[in-house]
Image (tube, rainbow, N blue to C red):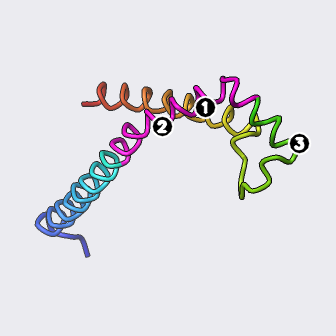
């Protein structure tokens, strides 16, 4: 049996209502994530400055000599950890730009 136009309209409106609610939740989550990410920029710049500093090199040598064995973790002293994270941030920024451009164009 075919659905009536009223039934089709009800289904359509219900589906669009679900999409609207979902989009509102996703926007709120994205706004929160962006705020947290933006708030972390000072700490990120501090980490990058450290990565390129003499202190990083000196700390790395101390770690290699076993002088920093009290640390439970020293991943930051591996050159790849910070460098790879910087690359991931770069790729994320590109993805955000592409998405922002798409969102603006589809408005």
Closest to the observer: 37 or 77? Answer: 77
The region drawn magenta spans 33-57
Instruction: Report crowding for label 3: few under 14, some 14 to 19, many 20 or more residues within 10 A (C-alpha).
Output: few
Which quadrant of the figure has residue 62?
Answer: top right
Q: Which residue is mark 1?
A: 86
Q: CA distance from mark 3 to mark 1?
A: 27 Å
Q: CA distance from mark 2 to mark 3?
A: 28 Å
Instruction: Report crowding for label 2: few under 14, some 14 to 19, many 20 or more residues within 10 A (C-alpha).
Output: few
Q: Is residue 87 magenta?
A: no
Between discs 3 and 1, the one toward the N terminus: 3
What residue is shown at x 83% (from left), y 35% (from top)? 61
Numbered mark located on residue 65 in the image = 3
Residue 103: horizontal and vertical position, in percent? 32, 32
Predominant SS along the magenta part: helix
**Is residue 17 left or right of 36 when viewed as pictured?**
left
Residue 83: horizontal and vertical position, in percent? 68, 31
Closest to the observer: 61 or 24? Answer: 61
Between discs 1 and 2, the one toward the N terminus: 2
What residue is shown at x 24% (from left), y 70% (from top)? 2
Q: Can you tell which of label 3 and label 1 is closer to the viewer? A: 3
What residue is shown at x 43% (from left), y 40% (from top)? 40
- Say if 80 sits above or below 70 in the image: above
What residue is shown at x 81% (from left), y 43% (from top)? 63
- Say if 89 sits above or below 105 in the image: below
**Is residue 41 left or right of 23 when viewed as pictured?**
right
- Say if 36 sits above or below 51 in the image: below
Q: Which residue is mark 2?
A: 43
- Name the secondary structure under disc 3: loop
- Name the secondary structure under disc 1: helix
Which quadrant of the figure has residue 37?
Answer: top left
Quadrant of the drawing holding the C terminus: top left
């Amino acid at each position: 049996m075919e659905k009536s136009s009223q039934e089709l309209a009800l289904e359509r409106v219900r589906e669009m209502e679900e999409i609207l609610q979902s989009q509102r939740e996703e926007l709120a989550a994205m706004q929160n994530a962006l705020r947290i990410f933006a708030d972390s920029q000072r700490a990120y710049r501090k980490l990058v400055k450290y990565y390129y500093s003499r202190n990083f090199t000196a700390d790395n040598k101390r770690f290699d000599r076993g002088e920093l064995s009290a640390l439970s973790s020293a991943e930051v002293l591996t050159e790849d950890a910070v460098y790879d994270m910087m690359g991931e941030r770069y790729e994320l920024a590109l993805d955000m730009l592409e998405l922002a451009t798409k969102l603006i164009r589809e408005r």
